[in-house]
Image (tube, coloured by chain):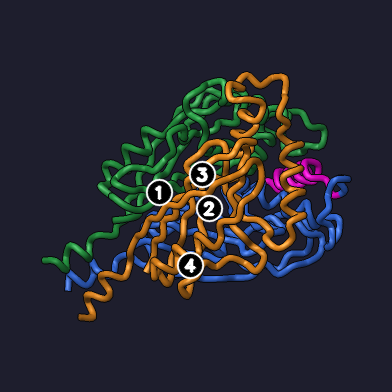
Chain colours: A blue, B orange, C green
Amino acid sequence: MWFILVCMSMRVKTEQFTVATSGKGTYEITDKVEAIVRESEVKSGVATVFTQHTSCSLIVMENADPTARRDLEEFFDRLVPENADYFEHDAEGADDMPSHIRMVLTRTSETVPIADGRMQLGTWQGIFLFEHRRAPHRRKIMVTIMGE
Amino acid sequence: MWFILVCMSMRVKTEQFTVATSGKGTYEITDKVEAIVRESEVKSGVATVFTQHTSCSLIVMENADPTARRDLEEFFDRLVPENADYFEHDAEGADDMPSHIRMVLTRTSETVPIADGRMQLGTWQGIFLFEHRRAPHRRKIMVTIMGE
Amino acid sequence: MWFILVCMSMRVKTEQFTVATSGKGTYEITDKVEAIVRESEVKSGVATVFTQHTSCSLIVMENADPTARRDLEEFFDRLVPENADYFEHDAEGADDMPSHIRMVLTRTSETVPIADGRMQLGTWQGIFLFEHRRAPHRRKIMVTIMGE
């Protein structure tokens, strides 16, 4: 009986959810990821969050003061302006190429440790989907939990 | 017999391959990583891709339209210009220090979920080695597959 | 007996340590992470390093020449200047908002492969805590080792 418990201790669980975005900005997904961690019953391991797109991305960011996220969004709008004269890739509009660059400058995957059955985020850390397109989109997020 | 199957379900596999680059630019490695995932026979888990260098990096990027990658490369050439007057670290040439900064702004590791025995990349996502040096290099990529 | 060996091969270990920083800059943590890998006795797998803060981050960087890190720090001071006139989030001072942006542009988690019981960093790669605040801080780093 003890053998079985040991054997089954390490496991993998993958879940997917969708975020409906309404244009450029940051959308918190911490609670959705935490719920998947809780349901997995994994006590110790890691949660890998992954976005399956090339025009939105993931960030871990300050989750208390909304002005921090507004300033971040303004920074990215200035760092990667929509109408750079050298952009050739603009079939989907002025926000097309900047969205790919903003994605490359942030993250497609983020891995967060799990201990005591919970993600070990710091006090002010939240996980956010960073939408880079002006139009509303439905974004798919995959969460893979590995551990015991 | 059933016990043995459960016991052996979680596993780790590490493989390495080399990419020969011919100067600054993006080199797709999706097929090479996917082949390692397939050979591992892991059905559910994650693939971690890692580059063992400080002057190239990894990105997930739009893989359909080559102009998107050209615009991305142009953006990085402008964001991190080669001849910043304050650079002290230039022993290996004008592209030496910019290559480290471009690496820090992108990624050394990327983790992609595996489900149904395949990497769960989105429709337009490809994994690319981003070479930041002008001269040709041989770049080592490690892929670690974990799962069941 | 053979069953038990197979069963127990995959495991997870989580450790935490603190880095005392003395202002903006890069602080190498490679040796501390390597020691945790060694103590875990995991021979093959991955080490995930995670920082539990929103005003410092992690980078993999050239670890031989200190001028490379000084140039990197100068680049970030110029890319994300302290007194952008549009910043609203400045309750903790001029370095408050830039610290969040610099964190988003670098990394919160980094995953490094383990083979032969050692992290597979390249010759010149070091793992660094990148402190973005002027004042000294105590920064928590979590390391999760998974493998066999």
Which of the 4 image quadrants contains residue A96? Answer: bottom right
Q: Is residue C68 left or right of residue B35?
A: right
Confirm whether the magenta stretch covers residue A80.
Answer: yes
* Label 1 CA crowd tier, 10 Å (few <14, some 14–19, many 20+): many
Q: CA distance from mark 1 to mark 3?
A: 16 Å
Amino acid found under the numbered disc labelled 4: Ile
Q: Chain of mark 4?
A: B
**Mark number for residue B114?**
4
* Label 3 CA crowd tier, 10 Å (few <14, some 14–19, many 20+): some
* Label 4 CA crowd tier, 10 Å (few <14, some 14–19, many 20+): many
Among the two numbered marks 4 and 3 on one chain, the one whose residue lies closer to the N terminus:
4
Q: Which residues fall within the magenta stretch?
A: A65-82
Q: CA distance from mark 4 to mark 3?
A: 24 Å
Q: CA distance from mark 2 to mark 1?
A: 11 Å
**Mark number for residue C113?**
1
The quadrant of the picture occupied by the N terminus of chain B is bottom left
Of the pair A92 and A9, the residue shown nearer to us? A92
Single out the mark in the foreground, 1 or 3. Answer: 3
Q: Is residue C115 left or right of residue B20?
A: left
Query: Where B115 falls versus B68 (above or below)?
Result: below
Query: What residue would you read off at disc 2?
Result: B110
Amino acid found under the numbered disc labelled 3: Arg
Q: Residue at x 73, y 31 (%)?
A: B81
Are both tags, 1 and 3, on one chain? no
Q: Chain of mark 2?
A: B
Q: CA distance from mark 4 to mark 1?
A: 17 Å
Amino acid found under the numbered disc labelled 1: Pro
Task: Single out the residue that lies furthest toward the left.
Answer: C1
Which of the 4 image quadrants contains residue A146? Answer: bottom left
Q: Secondary structure at mark 2?
A: strand
